[in-house]
Amino acid sequence: MLYGRSTELAALDELTAGAREGRSGALVLRGEAGIGKTALLDRTAQSASASGMRVLRVTGVEPEADLAFGGLVQLLWPVQDRLDGLPEPQADALRAVLGATRPPTRDRFLTGLAVLTLLADLAEQGPLLCLVDDAQWLDQATSDALLFAARRLAAEQVAMVFATRDEGFAAPGLTELRPSRLDTGDAVSLLADLGLPPALRDQVIAESAGNPLALIEFGAARRDDPGSFTPVTVADRVLSSYRTQIAALPEKTRLALLFAAAEGRGDLPLQMKAARTLGVGLEDLEDAERAGLIQVTESTVVFRHPLIGTAAYQGAVLARRIAVHQALADAADDPDCRARHLPLATTSPDDEVASELVAAAERAADRSAYAAASLLHQQAARLTPDRRAQVRRLTDAAACALNAGHAGQARDLAEQAERSSPEPEDLARLAPVRAAVMFESGERREAARLLLRTHAAGPGLGPAILRTGATYGWFAGDADSVREAAERLASLGEADPMVEGMAHLVDDDYARGLPLLERAVAAGQDGSDAARTRALHSAILLGDDAAAMELAAAEVARCRAQGLIGALPQALHLLAERQVLAGAHRDAEASVAEAVEIARDTGLRERVAWLGGVPARIAAIEGDERRCRDLVRDVPDVGRVAGESALSLLELARGDYEAALGRLETAAGPGPQRHMAMAMATVADQVEAAVRLGQSGRAERPMRAFEAWARAGRQPWALAVAHRCRALVDGREEDYREAVRLHGQGRRPFERARTALLYGEWLRRARRRSEARDTLRSALEDFEGLRAVPWAERARAELRAAGDATTSAKATAENVLDRLTPQELQVVRLAADGNSSREIAAQLFLSRRTVEHHLYKAYPKLGVGSRRELARLNLV
């Protein structure tokens, strides 16, 4: 009987009922020790089992909080036979977790995706309940995987419940429920079986502060010793009560309990194997079992409450704890289990132990458990007698912390390593980690300079450090760093066309720089992953829309195929930017929506903010001022050009030319960022605003730079915009005509429409109204297709002025795709291409049931009833 838990039980019942009906969900029970979280999980498990739900359960244990994937192994061990049904990268990730020999898993989020797919597959046979107790003691790799799965649950018939103490286990995005303290009536009912006198019962209730475990333990203690009372917190009093009970046990029983507490996983055979070396046997657990402190089966030992294990461990002297950990390490067959106990059994530097810890750290990193790997490297450093070897291990710990997403910890470890050694070689190994942390913290120029100084001190580091330094320098606006990196690469015989091209761009030497970027694009088409990445960024700098779109789409496909979920948001971001330029606004919104969802699920908060620049641009084009301003507000400083570009476009559309021009002049500033394609595209806005103000001289310098860039790059859209800008300034019709012609070869419909609008205005002012009307209608058609409301209004106004009396505001073009959410749009397009639900799920990192749920919702919106009918629709 659970007293005072009607609200909590109702919430848990609703969660499991929803899973049985096809609505997945997750809930966090958060509260102090003893508040009844485990009892609620027990009751939920019993109720779910009785209704036919399958139940998987894992309990975090404090000694395993740093053991890579220890909790996930416990949860998935009973269902490992289902791994063969997963997509191969996901199956390999879980095989690595479970100890099978498989290639390393480098994406730390792939395991979470694999867990989601596995849970969804299990739920195909019936609703599934996953219970996680003492989640605050899960290792981070397990927490990350389970939280990723929990956040992406939708229609899989899966319910997840996490029980955790107040501290630890941050789970943003999940619903939380805090079990309440028991009121006096419920407390009296709970104590009824103890037969306490009313006065003593009331005193127990007051001392327990409504904590159910405290009520039970204090009540039993007062019954046996009415004078017992210690004026400390409830948790400490409960712990003290357990220590008192343990202290009354025989010495060998206390030692057997210490083995159980130190081992932590309840592995009875391992505990007994180790305990025999200290003269302890299975019979020594009997007194503790009779006292109700533990439950013993043929293969496990489980403490009735985790605080009992804490009391058994904390109540032992240090020498005993060291001896027990050494015995457990010696008895362990699993090298990772041995590595967990060795640092707790070693009090002075020991190179052999340190080497074992390094090996364990490397195994953890191979499975993408970077947080665990970082801790193991730190422990190895502590036990390493040689100072320089210690610095290397601290460096490795910092690198793993950075890979785990812990930039602050990485910085601390890097600084610790730097203080420990002045040796140039050690500092050189440390520099990439320090620079990465600095770059992420906004110290971009300093990061670039550090890498270049490091390479100068140790040229054997190779070209990668110079390429990274050039990239950091580019984003920092540090022209000298880009030039220096290019020169050094050339001197090493490793000339990189992208870096060399960037070095020329910072000197405004487009004629030499852009052909080098073209070489980088060509070299990356069939090259390594790194070469293709350089090719993509080179294509963006070139303004080569066709190559950039193809390379961005290929990068997204590669991330999907290889399960690189951590890298996918950036790839989708780059693709979305290209889609906006191509006028595919709905596609871009779908790409951004997926990227935002994944970035949130994986804790990439900076990327979430950065992604706002893409829909802000769409909102600016479509004239949605409030949405545009809301999105730009959160764009980080490094994305300032994109944000200011969106706002200036809004101001330009409504005729606030001074505001638009001032904003763009401020945003452009000095530095290489002005050469990026997005920044170059804003030159046209500067020119138009300046001409409208009658101050074309304010845009002369950026216009000349843009013309030189366009001529060197030979991209039709860029040449067209260059001619349009020159036509605005000089008023020559031949420039307008050439711009219109070149737009016919380009891929940017918004720019094409703007050119047609301006040319139509020029024709009308030249009293060539018939020609003006034809040109303006072309502009209007493009603007309406893009939903560029303010621009369409300008085109209509010009048409009316040109004598087209029939032109009126047209309702937004009917498009069935507009009825779909971004994710529904992605799903239906893949389904129309003939992909199965399972194939779509693998590509979009969803479950099969979620895919079918989206299709079920999309069909009536599209007026179809099957995949066959879907394939007949125009979904472009």
Image (tube, grey):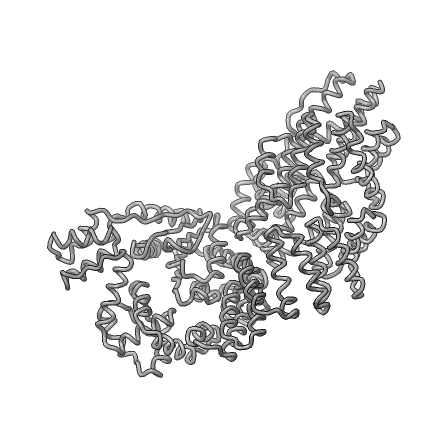
Q: Quadrant of residue 687?
A: top right
Say how many tags the image has: 0
> Does residue 743 show up?
no
Q: Nearer the viewer, residue 680 or 39?
A: 680
Seen at 48% across and 50% down, the residue is 151
What residue is shown at x 35% (from left), y 46% (from top)?
A: 11
Residue 515: where, in percent of width, then height?
Answer: 83, 51
The part of the image, by quadrant, that contains residue 488 is bottom right
Instruction: State the residue in front, 457 or 299.
Output: 457
**Would you place residue 504 above or below residue 386 in this image?**
above
Image location (x, y in percent) of residue 361: 53, 70
Query: From where the camera sits, is residue 222 visible?
Result: yes
Q: Is residue 19 left or right of residue 357?
A: left
From the viewer's perspective, is residue 80 above or below residue 4? below
Image coordinates of residue 842 in percent, x first then y, are 58, 55
Residue 264 appears left or right of 631: left
Judged from this view, the residue extending furthest toward the right is 734
Tell which of 154 and 716 is nearer to you: 716
Nearer-the-camera pick, 727 or 782:
727
The reply, left or right, for residue 641 in relation to residue 221 is right
The quadrant of the picture occupied by the C terminus is: top right
Could you say where residue 415 lies in the image, as x and y percent from the top left?
56, 62
Q: Along the horizontal axis of the image, is 736 left or right of 123?
A: right
